[in-house]
Image (cartoon, rainbow, N blue to C red):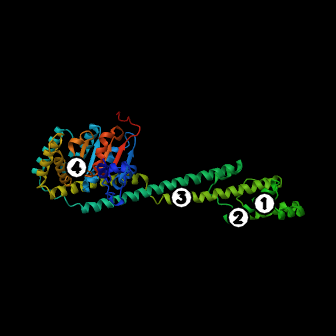
Amino acid sequence: MQKLVKRANHTSLGILLNLDRKSELIPEPIDLLEVVELNESQRKSASAALNQPFTVITGPPGTGKSQVVLALVASMAAAGKPVLFVSKNNEAVEVVRRKLVKILGDDDWILRLGSKMKIDQEMERLIDKAMTYKASGSGTYHEEWQNLTKYIDKRQELHGYNLKAYRIMSDYAKALQRQRKCVAYLPGEWQSWWDADSSIFWPGADKRNKIKRYIEDVKAIANKRWPGLWLFLMRLFYGHRFIRNYQKKFLNDIGDPPDDLPEWCHEDELNWENLLLDLQVIDNIYNIQKESVNLKKLVSEIETIPQSHHIKKDAKIIEERITSISRKVCRSKINSRVERKINFLPSILKEYWELTKKAASFYHKTAIQIQKDFGNSANKLLSITPAAIVTSLSARRSLPLEANIFDCVIIDEASQCDIASALPILFRAKRMAVIGDPRQLRHIS
């Protein structure tokens, strides 16, 4: 048992069991190839799985988890990192398999393992394909990779436009709300006056600080609060002349008003309460004008951003180009690896095929040696065809129980996968991505 735990130490099973794990053994990051269109959340999930030792991706049906699976398998296969896709559900395995065949076309070298019949069919297919293989010369992908990087940068630029537009529209809505709030504070006749000509910029903004100081002074006196010693003495000694002095300062600082201006409250009766109302009207007009300036500035900013329908159109074209180029790069990388060892592939496939039959017997006298040979054969085969797809229950027959023969294992429909079949699968890989819906019916065991 201790020997098994020691072997599991540096596998994804060791991560799950929280065994000691040296930081230098964390797998190196892998570039994401978007062989299917991914939204931002899907890209983040896929990138996490390609760069972290343990990733959990959850979401209800219809949220695109299968898109993430396809991107992960293709990205790792293209990078030459052996990847194992597993699901308890045979139909889920078949769906992923069919989609990968559609993506890879003639460059499909992914192993579909499973029952004896499936292994026999797959080995016959791949051996026949290897025997009739013709070099396509599609192994040069560096120029396509540069184009891919260029389109990803363009997409990021469009995303920046969207973020900027969202920020501006959000700021515009807030400024408009603040302006409407200030207009609502105006008396009815002043609201009508503003609505009739909202382009008026009166009074001058340079006097605003004085007006605000007047408001604080008049508010203290009008509300019968302690105004401070200086105001108290001025009001005590000057009496009515003191309020007239404030009225004069007020009318002087607001400058020449428009002809159609509503009447001031203090014109009916000069008292501190009415003067405060007039000062507050002017302060609200200042606030309204301030927000008007902000709104015009935001409108000018939004005009510098391409129109939304142009952004949408460009984004669609860019996404299609990214997907198309990613598929070309993926196929080229896989094909170039196969092409280098195509002469050895038929014999490696036949050896692996024979060993799957021998390893299926529990009572073979040379079981230990067969398992060792099975592991060596799997490593040779996965160095050429670095992706395998199998159900969790069929993995025992199809794959040797060797630590870290895969760089990553992807478990789909994880809530339906039983622990007994999952643990040996995790033992076979350096890192894992667990994908599923936590609200889905769990496995009954």
Three-letter residue code for mark 3: Leu
Residue 151 at x, y percent in the picture: 33, 59
> Whole-Å distance between the Cαs marked 4 and 1?
79 Å
Instruction: State the mark number for residue 298.
Output: 3
> Which amino acid lies under the numbered mark 1 shown in the image of this protein?
Asp
Residue topped by disc 1 = 217
Foreground disc of the pair 1, 3: 1
Q: Which residue is mark 2?
A: 209
Question: x and y percent of residue 410 in the render?
Answer: 31, 47
- Residue at the far front: name it: 2
Q: Return the residue nearer the eye: 51 or 419.
A: 419
In screen coordinates, is 233 left or right of 280?
right
The residue under the point 13% across, 51% down is 348
Mark 1 and mark 3: span between their CA atoms? 35 Å
Residue identified by numbered label 4: 104
Element marked by disc 2:
helix
